[in-house]
């Protein structure tokens, strides 16, 4: 394989905290764009638990389309992305202050229901450990292991596009024939911060997938305890942590699949075409 150009060596605690702050800001920007898109479409989901995952994934999809549009006209410059990023952060803060509704009673009821079970307390402790492990895994440097598409395809093509400032086909990289969703998100993150840290966007889709599973289980009528148990199983599954180590499409794909299924069930129940 040779040297891994995206492996920066060991990472200090201060650097990891900086990357964590950067990905938190990126997640907030994605949520802000998605929430503003939902507001512009005059769609306020009537089912508890849908608004947050819809906002995150609408925002991530909007970022991917934005990258495609900018790349098509040769505007893939860091200054352009940072200006747009600043506007999204400002828009998100405005929405939180002026338009965000207070937390619903449903969330408080679920937490109270969980607190009555000793098994739930044990599950929460395990979830905290698993979440800490997920954070450490996602923040670790990119691994140059065999079969890692991120090292061989996604990250190299994003580096080329960053240098050429447009989207173009790279002859020895078949993934550039059609710029895919995850590459667009990686490129956006790399233009704002650093391409070497783009693996941390897996945290965006980890949280989106957890929220999507919650929306799906609540749509199916599962109790708060059963929903929490399902989320815990997903969080401690080794395959989930495996994909946090890589630059893959799987966590992003699972987020959309879980939420799409939940929206389809909600449409069947309500008949509302928005879902």
Image (cartoon, grey):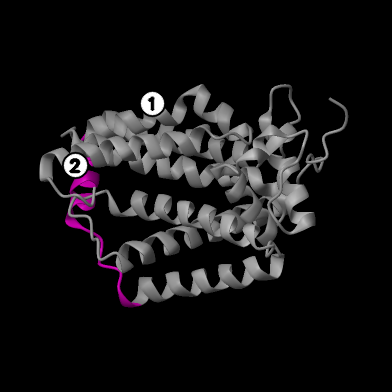
Residue at left offset 41%, top offset 28%: 234
Using residue 5 as the reference point, say whether residue 220 is left or right of it. left
Front residue (pair 77, 148): 77
Please give the label number shown on residue 266: 2
Q: Residue furthest left?
A: 270
Residue at left offset 74%, top offset 59%: 165
Image quarter (top left, top right, bottom left or bottom right) of the N terminus: top right
Image-quadrant location for residue 117: top left
Does the stretch in magenta take in 100? Answer: yes
Mark 2–mark 1 Cα distance, whole angstroms, equals 24 Å
Rendered view: 56 above or below 234: below
State whether residue 2 appears in this view. yes
- On the image, the x and y values in percent for residue 89 come to 51, 70
- On the image, the x and y values in percent for residue 128 come to 45, 38
Q: Which residues are magenta?
A: 98-117
Using residue 62 as the reference point, say whether residue 110 is left or right of it. left
Say whether disc 2 or disc 1 marks the residue closer to the N-terminus.
1
Rendered view: 149 above or below 263: above
């Amino acid at each position: 394989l040779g040297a891994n150009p995206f492996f920066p060596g060991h990472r200090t605690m201060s650097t990891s905290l900086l990357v964590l702050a950067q990905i938190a800001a990126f997640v907030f920007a994605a949520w802000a764009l998605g929430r503003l898109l939902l507001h512009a479409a005059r769609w306020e989901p009537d089912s508890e638990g849908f608004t947050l995952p819809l906002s995150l994934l609408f925002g991530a999809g909007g970022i991917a389309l934005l990258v495609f549009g900018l790349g098509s006209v040769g505007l893939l410059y860091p200054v352009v992305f940072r200006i747009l990023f600043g506007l999204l952060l400002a828009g998100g803060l405005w929405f939180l202050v002026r338009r965000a509704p207070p937390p619903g009673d449903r969330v408080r009821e679920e937490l109270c229901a969980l607190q009555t079970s000793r098994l739930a307390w044990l599950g929460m402790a395990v979830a905290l450990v698993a979440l800490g492990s997920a954070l450490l895994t996602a923040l670790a440097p990119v691994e140059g292991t065999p079969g890692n598409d991120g090292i061989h395809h996604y990250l190299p093509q994003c580096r080329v596009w960053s240098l050429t400032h447009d989207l173009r086909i790279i002859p020895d990289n078949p993934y550039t024939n059609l710029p895919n969703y995850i590459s667009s998100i990686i490129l956006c993150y790399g233009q704002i911060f650093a391409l070497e840290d783009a693996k941390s966007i897996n945290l965006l889709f980890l949280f989106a997938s957890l929220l999507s599973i919650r929306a799906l289980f609540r749509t199916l009528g599962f109790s708060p305890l059963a929903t929490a148990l399902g989320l815990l199983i997903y969080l401690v599954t080794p395959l989930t942590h495996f994909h946090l180590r890589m630059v893959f499409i799987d966590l992003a794909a699972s987020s959309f699949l879980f939420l799409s299924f939940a929206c389809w069930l909600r449409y069947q129940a309500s008949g509302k075409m928005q879902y």
